[in-house]
Every structure is written in C-alpha cells, then in structure tokens.
Image (cartoon, helix red, strand yellow):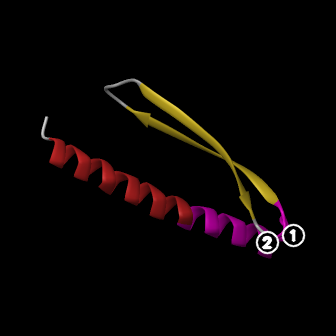
Amino acid sequence: MNEDVFNTSVRKFLKQVGVTSQREIEKAVREGVSGGRLKGNEKLPAKMVLTVGGVALSFTIDGEIELG
C-alpha cells in the first residue's frame, strides 16, 4: 500500500463529505425555518454513519447542531 496515495485519498473523501454535508444541513435548516417547521433556536440531534466496504467498517457519530 502506498501511504501517500492512501492518505491523500482519505483526505479528499473527507473534504467532500464535510463540504457536502454542511451544504445539505444548511439547506435543510433554512428550509425548515422558512417553512415554519423550525423556530431557529433549536438544538437538533444529528447522526453521521460512516461505512467503508471491503473492511466491514461501520462507525456512528452522534451529536447536536445548535441553531442559536
């Protein structure tokens, strides 16, 4: 295994996940506020599930997103 290629690939994937996830969360929250489903001061439970095929990895991160 080439450690440099592997590291670069993982970082690229995580950057894509981070940027895309942030956009989707922001979009959903803004739609929730504008649609009246959210007031804008909630704390929303959040969960991220990471799976990687070939190595049977399934990892869950639970957290909270505070709107203010």
> Disc 1 marks which residue?
39
Give the image location of residue 46, x and y in percent: 68, 49
In this view, 49 is above or below 36: above
Q: Quadrant of the C terminus?
A: bottom right
Q: Residue at x 44, y 55 (%)?
A: 17
Tell me which amino acid carries mark 2. Val
In this rendering, position of residue 32 left or right of residue 57? right
- Residue 2's disc is none
> Disc 2 marks which residue?
33
Q: Residue at x 12, y 40 (%)?
A: 2
Q: Main secondary structure of the magenta part?
A: helix
The front one of 10 and 25 is: 10
Magenta stretch in the rendered image: 23-42
Tell me which amino acid carries mark 1. Lys
Separation (CA) of disc 2 from disc 1: 6 Å
The front one of 10 and 39 is: 10
Crowding at mark 1 (Cα within 10 Å: few <14, some 14-19, many 20+): few
Give the image location of residue 15, x and y in percent: 39, 59
Q: Are marks 2 and 1 in contact (CB under 8 Å)?
A: yes
In this view, 34 is above or below 61: below
